[in-house]
Image (cartoon, helix red, strand yellow):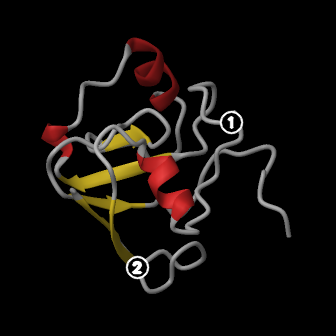
Amino acid sequence: MPQIIILPHEEMCPDGAVFEAEKGTSLCDAALKMHIHIEHACEKSCACTTCHVYVREGFESLEEATDLEEDYLDKAWGVDPDSRLSCQALVADEDLVIEIPKYTINMVSEAQH
């Protein structure tokens, strides 16, 4: 199984994480399964930007973003060429290195405090 490496994030994953994920699993679902609480205000339906991540390594192994995902990425904070919505990016055959942005444009948080 491909390995997912989450780079350290001050709030969501201070020490970073390394885990395996099944091919075809979304990056968001894989992270949530490992208790890394990536925001997903639209319930992973490609209708917001809160699950935006940077795919620092392995980007080429992912299927291309759909036009809808690209439209939402245009609205995300801090987007760069490695940006994807983690609810739409499905794990393929290669290991991935993921960076969670410091900020999101999120009006509603699904996290329960």
Residue 20 figure quarter? bottom left
Q: Residue at x 57, y 37 (%)?
A: 49
Type of residue at label 1? Answer: Glu
Residue 78 drawn above or below residue 72 = below
Q: Which residue is mark 1?
A: 43
Please count the marks in the image. Answer: 2
Residue at (52%, 45%) from the top-left corner? 77
- Residue 43 falls left or right of residue 18: right
Quadrant, the N terminus: bottom left
Up the image or down, 74 lies above or below 40; here it is above
Residue 38: % across, % down: 58, 57
Viewer-side residue, 42 vs 107:
42
Q: Residue at x 44, y 32 (%)?
A: 88
Quadrant, the C terminus: bottom right
- Quadrant assignment, res 108: top right
Q: Residue at x 38, y 39 (%)?
A: 84
In x, y percent, where is residue 61? 15, 39
In the figure, 67 relative to 84: above or below? above
**Where is residue 28 drawn, in percent x and y?**
50, 48
Label 2 element class:
loop
Residue at image mark 2: 16
